[in-house]
Amino acid sequence: MSMPARHVSRLGLGQGKSRNAHSYGGGRDSRAKVTASRTGNRESRLPLAKAKVNRSRATAGEALAGFTALGGLLKRLLTLVLACVALVAVSVGLLAGYRWLTTIDYFAIRELEITGLNRMAREDVLSQAEIAPGTNLLAVNMENVEAQLMGNPWIESAQVTRVLPGALKIRIVEREPSYIVQYEETLCYADVEGRIIDKVKADKFVSLPQVEVESGMERHLGVLEELRRAIADKRTPFGLDQVAWIRLSWRHGMEVRLMDRSVVLCVGVDDWKNNLAHMGLVWENLAKRGELDQAAIISAQNQKVWVEKHGQAS
């Protein structure tokens, strides 16, 4: 009876050893697991380390790119500064060269040619232009000289030409006085269009017909130029040197007083050419009959002519 119990006890001990053996075997597995977990931890830490390395490399790359951009900017800035310095140097050089050229005697004015003068004197032109022999030709401003010359009332136009190395040519077109008019209680010279030129001066007096214009008759000033042309073409019975004065009036139109004859000729400004032609026919008729000296007023209006003799009531 006791033997079976003992066998059971051995079986139990064997089973216990099996458990212990299983437990020991289980220790190896746990160490393997620990080793695997450590290896897994190392593997999990590798991507993080790589990320940190990549991030540091990226930061270094950005810094390098920033330094490169800064270097390019400094290079461009340095190039711009050098260009500005070079430009200033060239400008200073040109200015110094220009000043040198405008002071040397090689370009001094040795010849002054002035053409177109009629009433004006050569000295008047040079004084007006503020130019004298010896002036540096390159220092003369052509436009300023022309503007100064145009400030003279007797000069219609002026042209200044530089001829290197030392000649200056001035071409003048003078204004031609045709009449003497009373302007602001002063006698003045006027051109063919009635434009005021200058005051009448005793030392430079020019004998010309005096013109009077009634208020409102200024629009007929063009008739004066046409009358001048008619006199030049000998389409009038008198010459310009015979005219004492001319008046534009509302009543008689254009009145012409002759110096050598005490007669006044009145020509209507409307269709004045035909009126003047009819007056010429009557003038010739009076001259043939010897009655021209008796005429005090000869008036031609609307292609009709009236003669008023001296002593007759007007």
Image (tube, rainbow, N blue to C red):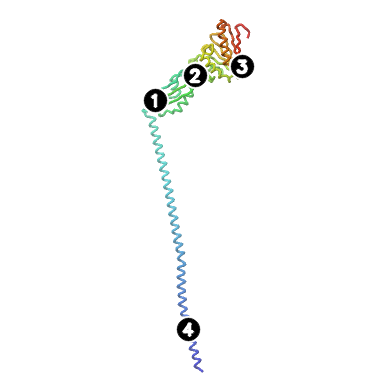
Q: Which residue is mark 3?
A: 250
Give SS at disc 1. Answer: strand
Alpha-carbon distance for marks 2 and 3? Answer: 28 Å
User: What residue is shown with label 2?
Assistant: 176
Disc 3 to disc 1, C-alpha distance: 55 Å
User: Please, what is the three-letter code of the amino acid marked with disc 1?
Assistant: Ala
Tell which circle, 2 or 4, labels the residue nearer the N-terminal end: 4
178 to 29, vertically: above or below: above
Q: Nearer the viewer, mark 3 or mark 1?
A: 3
Neighbours of disc 4 within 10 Å: few (<14), some (14-19), many (20+): few
Please report the residue visible at 51 percent of the width from the left and 15 percent of the height from the top. 233
For the residues bearing labels 2 and 4, Cβ distance under 8 angstroms: no
Disc 4 marks which residue? Answer: 18
Name the residue beneath numbered marker 1.
Answer: 167
Q: Whole-Å distance between the Cαs marked 3 and 4?
A: 158 Å
What percent of the width, then of the height, locates residue 156? 49, 22
Which residue type does callout 2 highlight?
Glu
Where is residue 264, by image quadrant? top right
Give the residue furthest to the left. 106
Of 229 and 77, which appears nearest the observer?
Answer: 229
The amino acid pointed to by label 4 is Ser
Q: Looking at the figure, which quarter contains the C terminus?
A: top right
Secondary element type, mark 3: loop
Mark 1 vs 2: CB contact within 8 A: no
Point out residue 313 in the picture as x, y percentages from the top left corner. 63, 8
N-terminal-most mark, 3 or 4: 4
